Structure formats: C-alpha cells, structure tokens
Amino acid sequence: MDNWAEAELAWELANAISASLSDRARAQLYATLGSGDSYTAIDTVLQAMAHQVSPMAPELVAQLANWLDAYTHSEDAPRLHELLRAIRALRWWAVEDFATSAEGGYSMQVGDADAGRLKLLGRFYDPNSAAFLEAAGVAAGDSVADLGCGHGAVTDRIAARVGDTGTVYAVDASPDQLRIARAALAHRRNVTFVEAAVENDPLAGVRVDWVYSRFLLMHVSDVRRALLAMANMLTEGGALLWEIADVGSLRFLPESPDSDVWRPWWYALGRARGAAYDVAERIEGFLDRTGFTIERCDRYQPVAASAEAKLVHALGFDQCAPAYLNEIGAPADQIDAHYGFLRRAVNDPTIMVALFSNTQYIARRR
C-alpha cells in the first residue's frame, strides 16, 4: 500500500472511533499515529474498534483486517478507495459504546450505556418540555413528581421552576438511572430521589400538585393501573402532565425500502414484552375511562437533516436490534439492510428525519 494511502486510512479509522475512547486511550492512539508507522497505527485502531464500537463492529473489523492484509501484497487502489469510503461511513458507530441487553418491557438501555442517546434526544425534546412546564403553570413553591426521571434532565428544569420553596420527587425503577440523576442534580436541595415503580406507591401516600412523566407510559405493562396510581398521587385540583411518545411516527424523508422496516418490529417487541408501545393511540381513552378531562393537548415533532437527529434513531435501533432478531424473529438480512441505510443516511444532508412525535397532555379529574 502507498504510504499516503496507509496514512489516510489510519487517520480515518482513528477519527471514526476517537469519540468512544477514554482520554488516555485517545492520546495513546494519536501518539501511535504520530510515530509514522501507519500500519501499526491501523492495527491499533482495529483492536480498539473491536472493543469500543457497536455489536456489528467485530464483523466489520474482521473484514477490514482481511482487506488490509491483502493490501500488503498488492497495489489495488480501487479496493483501497472502497475501504476508505466504508471507514468514513463508520463514523456514526463511534458516538457511544453500545450495549445490547434489556430488562422487562424497557427496550432502551439504562445507566451509562444509554447516556449518549439520551443526551442527543434531549437536544431535540428538552426545550419543548421546558415550554410545556411553563405553559402548564408549574411555579415556585409547587410540588411535582417526575415519574421515570431517567438521568434527571427534565427533573433539573422542574427543580429550577419550583425553586427552594418547592419539592420535586424524582422517581425511577432503575438504580442505575437514579445514580446518574443524583450525581447530575447534587446541587439541587429540593429534589428527593425514590427508587420504585410507578405502580408501587412511590410517594408513600404523599400528594403533589403535578404528576409529570415523559416517554414513560409506553414502557409499563398495565397503563390503566399506572394511571390510577398517578391519580392517587395528586392533590385536590392537581393535574397530570404527560408527554407521550409515538415512536412509530418516526419517518425518514425521502423514504426508501429499507428506511421503515424497523417499525413493525418495534410494535411486535412491545407485544412480546407486555409493554404498551402503542400507548399513543390509546391514551385518550384511558384518561376518559378513569375520570380525567384533557385540559390541553399539543403535539410536537422535530424534523431535521442533521447527523445528530438521525443518530437519535440510529442509537435506539442499535440497542433494540438484538431483541428484534432474537425475540421476535426479525430477518437478519432486513436488520442489516436498515443498518446499511442508517450508515448512508446519517451524514447525508439530503435525507431528513421526522423524529417521533411527542403529544403533551394536561389532564384533571372531572
């Protein structure tokens, strides 16, 4: 292989995965690159990829290693350029060190494994959540339960709104989520953390002015039971503040044969796990049957062509793919086809994504 080609390949590989490495590993990697031994640098990067990138990466690494071995014996420039294009397409894999297990009806990861996806998701949904809280009238001195608080991004906004005279209960069933939320909100003295499922009286009889949840109800097995539990947390005159995700509403624009294959798998996985992934279609009926009136309803759906927007779906799909394959029997070739579409689409400015719609409800007892 020509020296310039080796060097370009080594730098492309390094840039593709650098975001997923620790500071020390990144420094070691670029020190190797700077040594001038490009082949050693390439091998170093491949080894790092095998440990740092997505579940599909080991296969890609093996393929790349075979190609590299061939390049030491030939001057096959067209194949080199094919490899370079493949490496450039790998950049989106490096955003997070992906994990693949899930518990119960919750398909996304918890704790540190999902931090990258949640951070990206927050860029597109947190500002609208803040506007929702303001429009609802959450104010200084109020008491709020944030159910399914996750890493605490919205909890922080709620705590700021209610101030030191208010109270926020950050509730999550996952100790890993709460560990991160506690660290992130250590500066908030008005937040109480509770590890419990929403159905299990997490407030131990305490009543609050507002019961808030974002993207929670699709993960519960019994929506009606969860709704009744939330109702029992409210003071007289208190209100439910819900943000309901309709994951199936996500679309790529323009659509292609491989862009939407994931959608039926998402709903099938929800049914297999006893979760309510279709809750967006049924939530208003649940509210009506349990004695609530919808006071206000707004819908928000971000549309963007940025790589960050497309990664919100790509990272979520990567977490769900093993379950699609192993739990509901999604065809492996179709899963691979969607991965291929995502690798092409993420950095293509001509492809937009309409992220999942978020419907916001303010509801009170009749």
Image: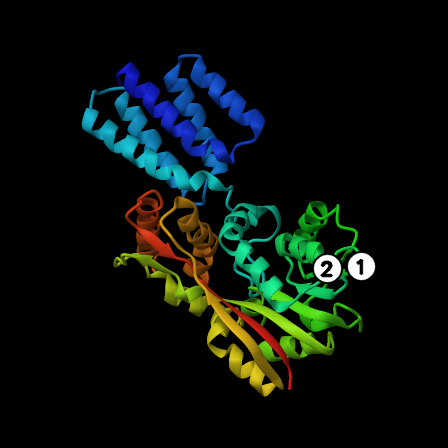
Identify the residue at horizontal 31%, vertical 44% (top origin).
348
Quadrant of residue 224 within the rendered picture: bottom right
Of the pair 316 and 66, the residue shown nearer to us:
316
Q: Where is mark 1, residue-wise?
A: 165
Percent from the top left, x then y, of residue 270?
Answer: 49, 69
Quarter containing the C terminus:
bottom right
> What separation in Å lies between label 1 and label 2 (alpha carbons)?
7 Å
For the N terminus, the image quarter is top left
> In the shown orientation, is residue 21 left or right of residue 139?
left
Q: Identify the image's colour scheme: rainbow, by chain, secondary structure or one colour.
A: rainbow
Q: Amino acid at mark 1?
A: Thr
**Which amino acid, mark 2?**
Val
| Residue 162: mark | 2
Q: Quadrant of residue 335?
A: bottom left
Q: Is residue 313 above or below residue 228?
A: above
Instruction: Please say whether residue 246 is visible from this viewpoint.
Output: no
**Which residue corresponds to the image point at 80% horizontal and 59% vertical from the top-left?**
165
In the rendered image, residue 17, in percent from the top left (x then y), is placed at 45, 33
